[in-house]
Amino acid sequence: MSADGDFGWRGIVIPAYGPTFLSAGAAGAVLPIAALRADELGASLGMAAFVVALTGVGQLVGVLPAGALVARIGERATLLRAGALDVVALAVAGWAPTLWLMGVALFVSGLATSAFFLARQGYMIDVLPQRLLARGMSLLGGSMRAGLLLGPVIGSLAIAPFGLQGAYGVAVLLAAGSALTVLTAPDLTGEHERARAAEPHTGVWRVIRQHARLLLTQGIAVLMISAMRTARLAILPLWALHIGLDGVDSSQIFAISGVAELVLVYPGGWMMDRLGRMWVVGALLTVMAASFLVLPFADSKGELLAVALCMALGNGLGSGIVMTLGADAAPQVDRAQFLGAWRLMGEAGHSVGSLGLSAVTVVASLPVAAVAAVALGALGIAGLVWSGVWLPRVDRERVAA
């Protein structure tokens, strides 16, 4: 990691956060209109949902190979290759003449995204001093959120004159800008990467076996946090539909809560650095669980907005927590392979959140969103208990070091 004495935030703003912001903006530009593009190509509603989900499938499938790739060629080279691949994949997805080709392109984009963000996490571990690690990771998470907010805004402006391809064109330009920023920014981690290149590399599966206990204890906490975050994005529009709100109301709630989520990004990182990781994990899970449990009582737009704001503030407070815990746990040797396994736990949590919510809606006889909200509230309480058992030792070990 960087030495404390010569560290300055200004020196890493563009090389560290610029590519992340632009890459997330590219994803955000495509996210709202991918299903519409699939519909243009003749997909049914169910098929359109499947095609859009292929991006997430690519992210899940790509995490372990991404860890192996970073270990072999380094963070910067991976960022450049992943960025270039994402540019091509987004262009193909936007102008694909057939549905299957669009699906393949979105899957490849997911693979590229997975490699990009894993390499970016390793990069941040190298450039940040230990005392500022959580703040730096929180700002990284905040730059992702800001990009995901800005991307749809810019993309929507291009749709009127150019159609849906206009949003894809914006995504291609943002992804190309991300790769170009990596290429032209100062190489701050070259010395670290050359040192790791001289070390022997262990296979990903062997690294997973070596750290299995850690992944099945602290990693389960990460899985629960990720599951609640993903389910939040699905259940809010479901509840808006349940209480009779239209698409405009639902979009406004999402936009306002998305902006609010950025407010506590840096304070959350400060809390993690100064007070300990468990303080933020506890606050995040408590606020999220309570918000899910009171969601069934929200009967109006204003009440739903209040619940959504609570969820957003809790989630924003924990911006970067998964990456910070991964950085804390990562070994010096075989770090990239371990981070791939760690990110796999987070991606598995995203899948559990979306699939679990779908399962509840299928089997529930009561209003499905209410049942799902209670189930997610219970998951948050369980996650709080589980985290309270395994995560405090992270803070003790960090202080002892």
Image (cartoon, rainbow, N blue to C red):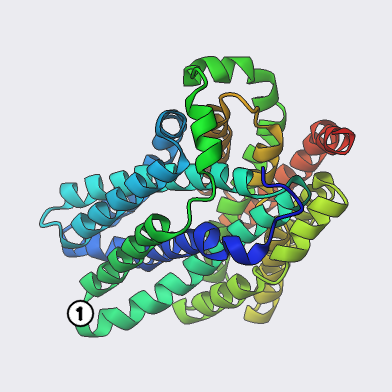
Residue 186 x %, y %: 48, 56
Location of residue 74 with respect to 141 vertically, above or below: above
- Quadrant in which residue 35 is drawn: bottom left
Residue 94 x %, y %: 21, 62
Q: Residue at x 64, y 57 (%)?
A: 370
Q: Residue at x 55, y 70 (%)?
A: 240
- Quadrant in which residue 378 is drawn: top right
Q: Quadrant of the C terminus?
A: top right
Residue type highlighted by circle 1: Phe
Residue 348 visible = no
**Nearest the camera: 376 or 196?**
196
Considering every residue shown, the one lying at the far left of the view is 97
Reading the image, the residue beneath label 1 is: 162
Could you tell me how many numbered marks the image carries? Answer: 1
Residue 328 visible = yes
Q: Quadrant of the N terminus?
A: top right
Location of residue 191 with respect to 233 vertically, above or below: above
Q: How many neighbours does mark 1 have within 10 angstroms: few (below 14), some (14-19), or many (20 or more)? A: few
Q: Which structural element holds mark 1? A: helix
Q: Residue at x 69, y 49 (%)?
A: 321
Q: Is residue 263 left or right of residue 244?
A: right
Residue 14 x %, y %: 51, 64
- Quadrant in which residue 319 is drawn: bottom right
Residue 30 x %, y %: 34, 64
Q: Residue at x 43, y 45 (%)?
A: 76
**Nearest the camera: 353 or 196?**
196
Location of residue 367 with respect to 213 vertically, above or below: below
Location of residue 60 with respect to 203 vertically, above or below: below
